[in-house]
Amino acid sequence: MERLQKIIAARGYCSRRKAEELIVQGRVKVNNIVVTTLGTKVSKGDQVHIDNKILIDKNNEKIYLMLNKPRNCVSTMYDPQHRKTVLNYVKDVSQRIYPVGRLDYDTSGLLLLTNDGEFTNIITHPSHIINKTYHVLVSGCLVKNQLQQLAMGVEIEPGIITSHAQAKLIKYQEDKDVSILLLTIHEGRKHQVKKMIQAIGHEVLKLKRIAIGFLQLDEELKPGEWRYLKPKEIKRFFGMASQLKIK
Ligand code: URA
C-alpha cells in the first residue's frame, strides 16, 4: 500500500505536490469513490480516476520505438565486457524496454525496441514473414552470377542453406574496389549477411539495416537518435500478423 499522492506521481501524471492539490480539490476517485483525505493508502491494483479519466500506469504502457543504432555498441541489455549498449541511447525512456532481435556490434541502422512481447514475436517469428533489408558495402566486384547465388540461397555453414533473398547491386566503385549491395533476407540467423557474403568469396566492410518489413529507417535520425513508432506503423505490424495468424 502506498499513499495516493505517491501513486499518482509514480504513474507519471504529475508531481506529488500537484497530486495533493488535486486530492484536496475532490478531483480524485479511488475505485469510483471521491477521496479528499491526504495520505489515504491505496494498492497498485486500485483504479484511480482524475477528473473522471482513468489514470493509466505509464510504466505499464506499451511502447515501441526505432533507434538508428550506431556502430560500436551491443544490442543486448547488458555486456559482460562493459561495452556501450543500445540502452545508453534511450536513457530518457522510463519504461523497461529491450531490443527486438539483434544487430552485430559493428552493424548500424534500424533497431526496434519495445516492452511488448507480442510485438517482438511478430517481428522475430520463425515463419520469417517480415523481411529485413540491409545496405552492404562489400569488398571487390560482385558479378551477376554471385547476385543470383545470394538470391537463390548459399551454404553459410555445413548443411545450412539460406532461403531465397533479394540481392540488388547498387554500384561498383572501381577506385576503391568495393560494391554496394542491397540485400533483403527473411531469416535472422546470427551474422547471416556476413556469412552469405563470405560464402560467395567476398567480405562485408560495412553493414547497415535500412528496413524491417515496410518500415524504413527514418532518414532524419542520426546514429544514436530514436523516435517513437507512429500508431499506424504499430497497427500495420499487428495487421500483418493477424492476416498470417501468427500472434
Ligand atoms: N547479418 C549480419 O551479419 N549482421 C547483422 O548485424 C545483421 C545481419
Image (cartoon, rainbow, N blue to C red):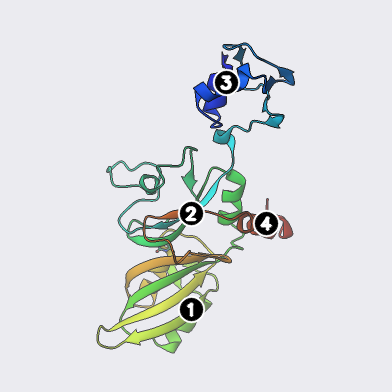
Name the residue that disc number 4 marks: 241
Q: Residues within 10 Å of mark 2 (few under 14, many from 20)?
A: some
Numbered badge on residue 167: 1
Of tags 3 and 2, which is closer to the observer?
3
Q: Name the residue type under label 3.
A: Glu
- Cβ of mark 4 under 8 Å from ligand 1: the answer is no
In the foreground, 24 or 176: 24
Provide residue 16's location: percent of width, then percent of height.
51, 22
The amino acid pointed to by label 4 is: Ala
Residue 27 is situated, as x and y percent measured from the top left of the image, at 67, 23
Q: Which residue is disc 3 drawn over? A: 21
* Relative horizontal placement of residue 159, taking residue 72 as reference (left or right): right
Instruction: Name the residue beneath numbered marker 2.
Output: 227
- Label 1: how many residues lie within 10 Å, few (<14), some (14-19) or many (20+)? many
Report if the CB atoms under discs 3 and 2 are less than 8 Å apart.
no
Q: Of circles 4 and 3, which is in front?
A: 3
Say if mark 2 contacts mark 4, CB within 8 Å.
Answer: no
* Whole-number angstrom distance, CA of label 1 to CA of label 3: 62 Å
Q: Residues within 10 Å of mark 4 (few under 14, many from 20)?
A: many
Residue 75 visible to the viewer: yes
